Image (spheres, rainbow, N blue to C red):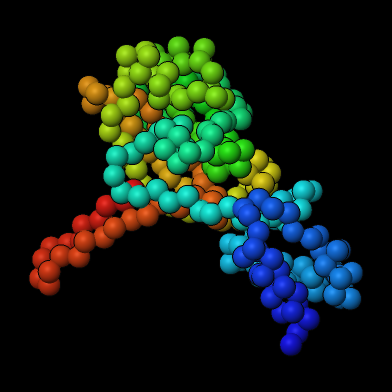
Amino acid sequence: MARYHEIERWLRERVVAAAPGETLPSESALAARFGVSRMTARHAVQNLALDGLVERRRGAGTFVATQRLHRRAGPLLNFTEDMRRRGKRASSTLLTAELRRARKAELDALSLAGDTRVVAISRVRLGDGVPLAIEHAALPATCAGVLAADLERGSLHEALTGLGRTPTTAHAWITARLATKPEARLLDVAPRGPLLIERRVILDAAGEPLESTETLYVPERYVIDATFTLNSPGSSGVRATAG
């Protein structure tokens, strides 16, 4: 048996018996315990990370991975309410909250005229203190009142409702890409690690564009389930719903 397989098997037994978030021995400690090089120990840890069993946080160590949060088909909850339903504490780290000139994609998504401003809010979204996503939201300038709300502990959608603009309908599409170095640092993941990207345009109760959002999820911590319904042979297409 290759030595890293021996270390990997020992680590897997530890992970099964441990609680999410529990610290595992460092690479140097594993190297000393099994009498191998740090490179061999790193190989074993990387295999567990690829399987989603552990999380490696730069400068902090290796931890037993938290169970992935699944968002299933059904009513779309805002992040704060989603965490409450799961029994978790929602919080945010506010990166920016400002009025700035709208970008082309934001003008199109919000049906705004050129050379106008938007409310731009960027936050790291956390569940029980674990970073799950980075969220970039753009709102019409008429919603500038939300800048006075507590956007780290409170809900943006609740603040919008308080302004008389209730988020009602969301149109979303999902892609993926690799994390940049700043994004990896904020999410406590490896540089150039995969991210799940969800873009949304949210309408208010009057059907007016209210919010354009790009959310970058850590797929090892948060996943979006989809249910596909196949039509019978000879029919015109495939229907799909996603949570």
Extreme-bottom residue of the structure? 1
Which residue is depicted at the point 51% across and 47% down? 217
| Name of the residue lying farthest toward the left | 234
Residue 30 x %, y %: 82, 67
Task: Note whether 105 is above or below 187 in the view shown.
Answer: above
Residue 112 visible somewhere in the drawing: yes
Depicted 112 relative to depicted 88: above or below = above
Nearer to us in this view, 236 or 72:
72
Q: Kindly indicate the quadrant of the structure image that contains residue 31.
A: bottom right
Q: Is residue 32 above or below residue 208?
A: below
Residue at the spot x=22%, y=22% of the render?
Answer: 206
From the viewer's perspective, tell me whether residue 4 is left or right of residue 100: right
Screen quadrant of the N terminus = bottom right
Residue 70 horizontal/vertical position (percent)? 43, 51
**Who is closer to the viewer here, 61 or 183?**
61
Residue furthest front as drawn = 17
Number of numbered discs overlaid on the protein picture: 0
Residue 123 appears in the picture as rendered: no
Please state which of residues 25 and 178 is positioned toward the viewer in this rendering: 25
Q: Residue at x 25, y 56 (%)?
A: 240
Pinpoint residue 82: horizontal percent, then vertical percent. Answer: 42, 37
- Please say if 178 is above or below 3: above
Tell me which corner region of the image, top left, top right, bottom left or bottom right, holds residue 95: top right
Give x and y (percent) for residue 84: 45, 34
**In screen coordinates, is 185 left or right of 230?**
right
